[in-house]
Structure formats: C-alpha cells, structure tokens
Amino acid sequence: MLVGIYKNNTLIYKYDTYEKTSEALPDIFRQIAKKYDITSLLYAKGPGSFMAIKISYIFLKSYSIVKNIPFMAVDGFYFNNNSPIKSIGKMYFVKEDNNITLDIIRKRELNDFQLPKILNKDDFSLDTTPLYVLPAV
C-alpha cells in the first residue's frame, strides 16, 4: 500500500507498506494527522483486492464525512502507467480504451505502482464507488 502526502499538488512524503490494509491504514492516518492538516482525500478505487478496496473505501469515506473534507477517486491504472494489474492466477486486469477486462498476460512487462511527483486533481472524480470489475463476493 502506498499513501502519499501532497502539498500544492507536489509529493512531499510517502508511506509504503506491505502490511494488510486493515492494520496499516489506521496507523498511517494517526501518524499523518499528527504532522499534517488533511484537507482532501484521493484514492485508487480499483481494480485489485476486493477486501483492500472495501476497507480503503469505508475508512476514507468515513474519514471524509467526519472531517468534512473532499473525497475523490481514480482507477488504479493511474498509478502504474496503465500497466495490467494482477488479479488471480495468471489473470490480470487490463485497461484499453477506458474498458477494464480480465485477461491472461504472458511475457508482458508490468509496471510497479508509483505515486506521481506532481498530482493532477482534475484526473480524479467525485465518483468514489469501488471499482470491482467482477461482482463482489
């Protein structure tokens, strides 16, 4: 999980963890709230792990309501240069012409997720509903 702190749309600090979202997100936000004034929340709404997406959405949506701050979203391809995103087995989520599908990817270079140094909030939407692609279980 990557969490970035942006000031004037420029990345100033990054939290990077492989812990479970349910355990890491509250701790990271406690640390952030001690140092920074959080004025908006932006997140990747999927595709990816259903559980991580659900937890992130519920946590961030609740935080935005309690703190009365804007909450916006974009799909995960924004953070990996439109590279396929791992699903299950050999299956990957693929985005082509704004359509997201599942496909088997063979011998294709995949990009890691990265937080952009400069964030363009115009790329984000007020539609924060999780993007499951497949029906949620």
Image: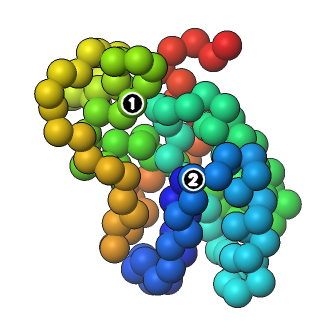
- Quarter of the C terminus within the rendering: top right
Residue drawn 61% across the image and 37% down it: 53
Which residue has dot 1 on it? 86
Q: Nearer the viewer, residue 7 or 125?
A: 7
Residue drawn 32% across the image and 50% down it: 112
Which mark identifies residue 18?
2
Asked which quadrant contains residue 127, the reply is top right
Asked which quadrant contains residue 100, the reply is top left
User: Does 28 appear above or below 6?
Assistant: above
In the image, taking residue 85 as reference, residue 16 lies left or right, namely right
In the image, taking residue 127 as reference, residue 95 lies left or right, namely left
Total numbered badges shown on the rendered structure: 2
Q: Nearer the viewer, residue 129 or 87?
A: 87
Element under disc 2: loop
In the image, taking residue 26 as reference, residue 123 lies left or right, namely left
Residue drawn 53% across the image and 24% down it: 132
In percent of width and height, residue 45 lies at 53, 40
